[in-house]
Amino acid sequence: MHKMTPELIFGTFIVYTFVILLISWITSRKADNQSFFIGNHKSPWFIVAYGMIGASLSGVTFISIPGWVSTTGFSYFVIVLGYVVGYAVITTVLLPIYYKLNLTSIYTYLDIRFGKSAYKTGSAYFLLSRIIGASFRMFLVISVLQVFVFDHFGIPFWSTAILFMVIIQIYTIRGGIKTIIWTDSLQTTFMLAAVVITVFMIAQNMDTSIVELTNLVGNSSLSEMFITDINSKQNFIKLFLSGIFITIVMTGLDQDMMQKNLSCRNLNDAKKNMTTLSLILVPVNLIFLFLGAILFLFATKNGIQLPEATDHAFPFIAFNYLGPVAGIIFIIGLISAAYSSADSALTSLTTSFTIDILELDKKYSDNGKLLKKNRYLIHIGMSILIIFVIISFKLINNQAIIAQLFTFAGYTYGPLLGLYSFGLLTSYKANGKLIPVIALISPLISYALSRYSEVLLNGYQIGFELLLINGLITFIGLYLTRKQFTN
């Protein structure tokens, strides 16, 4: 069987990128500032919901989830079940507030509820979270392409990073959200198609049916889902609760994800979008886990020595053992995952910095051209910043450190969870001067608890629930320093 060549992979990359740029050109004609920020409130909800699948999964899911099956089995699926509850909270609690207040940036709620200090603190934490998160997701994808393609042509990593961000810059700078809802839909299609087709191709190579393959996975240790050991980070109760709150903060309190919801025609459409997304993500994530299991079963049956880095398991088999068709399908899926996670992140970063930090929408409320000019400059600046962070990850060249950076979002979203919970669940006013201090101290305390949890808590390991602890510490800090009841 022929292996996938770097030349063929690169050619696929060029063709796919051309299609994305063509869609961008079509959708961004006559685009204005409102098109960029909220799609003129004309986005069809079903297109938004479908496109958000790709943005929700990202390159991390596409590459890492199949690889993680080797060490954690199907335990990740418990988090996915928690997602469904989290999306229900977003649909019934957060979306009605955002639409009632007619928000462009969701952090304006903090300004209305607590004042400028909370507003700027929340926005700053989002910017930090999204810059790190988007850069890490791009780093994962670019690293795979670098190993399997660009190293072959002698192209350095930094050039690859710049190339990707320039492409994303070109197709998002004019249309923003108006363009992204359509490009993300295409990218979701290719990403899901890549996974499903790969599953069938592996079944064919193993000379078995999907039903037989399902039984084989079900009878293996790889399909273990519910870990009952309370001290384990994979304990199913911890994972389920973490899934709920991860969704609330990383979707409901995230400008990147909510900006697409706010582009829908009305609240009812936004609710349909969120409910549909939550239900679709359940079987989709199960397919990714199933793929991971059969990749390792395929490798075992054929005596294949997989790369030490589990993130490379999927591309290694796709490129070397399933033929050129599988390789092309994989590379399109991978590029789709990269583009869909970075394009919306770049747009939301531009939106948040423009509106929340600089408040240019108010400054240039009567001058759309000047607002557009400044928005362009901010968009370019954010691209340069993401490139810098991606290259920094490469220079660190330490997998342990990079893994810690990926969990960094848990520390930065905690204060956001505490701020919004305090605003929604109480009628108190927060002490504006102390909000930034509390938001800074809370992650530091959370880090200390996580670092020494086994000693302090008799062997208990803090996992994803660190987000809840972080949010609770922020909430308690806001309560202890509260000012008075609101009217």
Image (cartoon, rainbow, N blue to C red):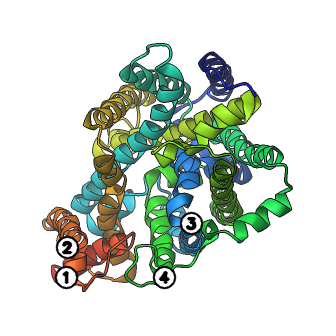
- At x 52% / y 50%, what residue is drawn? 64
- At x 51% / y 79%, what residue is drawn? 227
Q: Which residue is mark 2?
A: 452
Residue 429: percent from left, percent from top = 24, 77
Q: Are marks 4 and 2 in contact (CB under 8 Å)?
A: no
- In the picture shown, does residue 397 fall above or below 275? above
On residue 379, the disc is none
Q: CA distance from mark 1 to mark 2?
A: 6 Å
Q: Which residue is mark 3?
A: 73
Mark nearer the N terminus (1 vs 3): 3
Q: CA distance from mark 1 to mark 4?
A: 21 Å
Mark nearer the N terminus (2 vs 3): 3
The amino acid on which the numbered mark 1 sits, given as a three-letter code, is Leu
Name the element at disc 1. Answer: helix
Q: CA distance from mark 2 to mark 3?
A: 26 Å
Front residue of 382/98: it is 382
Q: Which residue is mark 4?
A: 237
**Left/right of residue 53 with respect to residue 453 in the rendered view:** right
- The mark closer to the camera, 1 or 3, is 3
- At x 50% / y 57%, what residue is drawn? 102
